[in-house]
Image: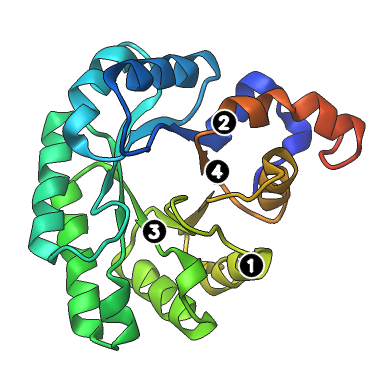
Amino acid sequence: MVDLSKLDKWALGKCFDHSVLPKQTTEDDIRQGCREAVKYNCAAFYSASPYWTPVVVEELAGTDVRVATGIGFPFGCQPGKVKALETEMAVKAGCTAVDTVINQGALKSRRLAEFKQDLADYKDAAGDALTKVILDTCYLTDEEIVIACEVIAELGFDYAKTSTGQFEGPTMEQFLLMRDTLEGTGIKLKVAGVKFPRPQNAYCFLLAGADLIGTRAAVAIIEALDQMREIGIVPAYQP
């Protein structure tokens, strides 16, 4: 669990994956987002697909910010082979972290062999890249969240992620269910789709056990750290 009392703004940056994901995103948007991710010491910068990965590689060269992208984003309903191919393309282009979206239709229809194979093919295609699996909990029952998390643990991914951020984000109850299901597995937790007011809610998820927050608002949330300490949401800094 992240100990916020030990983090200043610079160190806090590694709790955030910065992103620019809208469908109308331009090259200038991507470059600006990358520069913000570097300035605020973020863990990674995400585009919505590997299309912009060469630009991200260029902007992040010489930094420790991971080059990252979504796979099957944001719906996840593409055939598994298509998502695996997209993953291979992303890694070949320079991505060191990839986030895929589960096939919710397969999960809800209990076509669990296909559901699991889809994710296994993605993991194989990712090679040494950091792997994260997006649930979009807003459309899932508690039982489905548990099933998805159990498959994520069985296959040994690096992170389970609540949401794409393109629809409704997670409730705290849904996040805690993921946390409790994955306890002791070594799978880390990433929250995206944080609802307004974003600074307060983002810090609450970190306090509840999230390892990463994925957001387009990383800059504003990091900049709010002092205010969150002043009002008592985040503990005082104790270096």
Q: Position of residue 14 (x, y in %)?
A: 54, 30
Where disc 3 sits, the SS reads strand
Q: Disc 2 or disc 4, which is closer to the eye?
A: 2
Q: Disc 1 or disc 3, which is closer to the eye?
A: 3
* Disc number placed over residue 162 in the picture, else none: none
Is there a contact, CB below 8 Å, between mark 2 and mark 4? yes
Q: Position of residue 18 (x, y in %)?
A: 47, 32
Q: Amino acid at mark 3?
A: Ile
Residue lying furthest right in this view? 231
Q: Which residue is mark 1?
A: 176
Residue drawn where x is 32% and y is 54% of the image? 74
Sequence-wise first label, 2 or 1: 1
Q: Position of residue 189 (x, y in %)?
A: 51, 55
Q: Which residue is mark 4?
A: 213
Where disc 2 sits, the SS reads helix
Residue drawn where x is 13% and y is 47% of the image? 86
**Left of 149 or right of it: where is 90?**
left
> In this view of the protein, can residue 239 be seen by the observer?
no
Where disc 4 sits, the SS reads strand
